[in-house]
Image: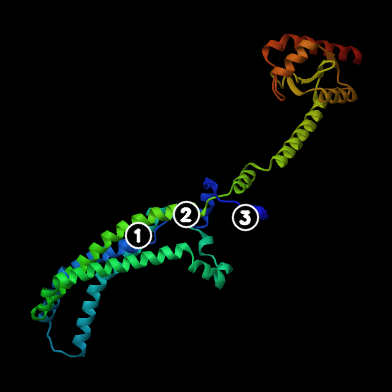
Amino acid sequence: MAGDSFQEKTEQPTEKRLEDAKKKGQVAQSKELSPCLIILFLSIFLYFSMSQGFNEMFKIYVSYVKNVNFDLNISNIQEIFSFGLFKWLKIVLPVFGLVFALSIFGNVVQTGFIFSSEAIGVKLEKLNPLEGLKKLLSKRSAVEVLKSIIKIVIVTYIAYNIILKELPYMLSLSSQDIKSIVGYCGKAIFSIALKVSIIMLFITCLDFFYQKWQHKKDLMMTQQEIKEEYKEREGNPLIKSRIRSLQREMSRRRMIEDVKKADVIVTNPTTFAVALSYKIGEMPAPMVVAKGAGFVSEKIKEVARKHGIPLVENKPLARGLYYSVKIGAYIPEQFYVVVAELLAAIYKEKKTVTL
C-alpha cells in the first residue's frame, strides 16, 4: 500500500525474512577475509620458495648442468627451460589450488554453503545508470572507500617502516650473491605480508560484525510488513474462516450421505440425533456414522424418514453417544447392552413386517 512506504522500519527482521534473503544470496559477510587468508598463505609460500626453495632449485640446476654434456646452444637452453618450468609448475599449481580453496573457505566459514540462482541472474535494474549512481553515492560505498584507504595506509606504513629499518642492509645487497639477494627478498616480503595479514584479520573481524549489523538493518521491517508476512504465513483470517466453513459444509454433506447406511437413529427428540450402523460379522461393535444437534439433527432425521430408517427416542442414550463417541468410531462397552437391545427390537420388528 502507498502509505506503508512512509512507515519507519522499526521491527527486527523475522526468520522468514532472513531465510528469504539468504535464498537470494543476501547474507552478512566480509569480503576482506578471503583476500586476507590468500595474502597470508602466499607470504608463507613466497618465504619458503624464495628463501629456501630457491636454494634447492639452484642446487638442482647446478647438478643438472654438471651432469649433461653442456654446450650452450638453443637445444640446451630449451631443455633447461623445460626442466625449470616443470619443477616450478609442480610448486605453483598446488598453490593455485590452495588459493582457490582458501577463497571458497573464506566465504563458507562466514555464511555456510549457499547457492543462489537469483544472485547470479541478470537483472535489468543493475544496468540502470541511475541505480548505479545511487549505489556509488550510498553509505555502503563510502564505507568500502574508507576501508580501501585504511588498507592502503596500513600497507604503506608497514612497508615504509620495514624498508627504513632494512635500508642499510639493502644498500649492501649489490655485493651479495644471487642466492642471498633472493633469500633476503623472500624474508622481507614475508615480514611485510605477515604484519599486513595480522592487521587485516583484525580489520576483517570488525568488518564482519559491521556487515552483520548493516545486513540486519537493511532487512528491518515495518509493522505493516510484519502483519502482511503473518497473513501470508498463516493465511488471511477471512479466507481461512471461509475455508473452514466450506470444509465443515463438505464434512456435513458426507456425514448426511452416511445416514443412508445407518440401521437406526437414536434421538433426543428436540436436540440430538445419532445414526448407528452395525453389520453382523463385519463390525466388532455398532458404529456411529453420523450425529448432530439442532439443524443437523433435523436433517439427519429427515434423511432417515426419507429412506425408511427407524427413529428411536432414547434421551440418555442419544446424549451419551453424542458427547462420548466420534463419528466413524465404535461405541464403547458401556453402551453395548442398551444398543444391543435396541437393535434386536428393530431387527425383530423388521422380521415381523417381512413375514
Amino acid at pointer 2: His
Tell us which disc is closer to us: 3 or 1: 3
Seen in the picture, residue 339 relative to 84 is either above or below; the reply is above
Cα–Cα gap, marks 3 and 1: 36 Å
Q: In this view, does 191 lie to the left or right of 104?
A: left
Give whichever of discs 3 and 2 has the lower sequence position. 3
Q: Quadrant of residue 33?
A: bottom left
Q: Mark 2 points at which residue?
A: 215
Asked whether 345 or 270 is in front, the reply is 270
- Please tell me how crowded label 1 is: few (under 14), some (14-19), or many (20+) other residues with Cα within 10 Å: many
Q: Quadrant of residue 313?
A: top right
Cα–Cα gap, marks 3 and 2: 20 Å
- Percent across and percent down for residue 352 are 89, 11
Mark 2, secondary structure of its residue: helix
Confirm or deny contact between disc 3 and disc 2 (CB under 8 A).
no
Q: In this view, does 348 lie to the left or right of 9?
A: right
Tell us which disc is closer to us: 3 or 2: 3
Seen in the picture, residue 329 relative to 10 is either above or below; the reply is above
Q: Quadrant of the C terminus?
A: top right
Confirm or deny contact between disc 3 and disc 1 (CB under 8 A).
no
Cα–Cα gap, marks 2 and 1: 17 Å
Amino acid at pointer 1: Leu
Q: Is residue 192 left or right of residue 248?
A: left
Q: Is residue 243 left or right of residue 43?
A: right
Please give the label number shown on residue 5.
Answer: 3
- Percent across and percent down for residue 30 are 39, 58
Please give the label number shown on residue 33.
Answer: 1
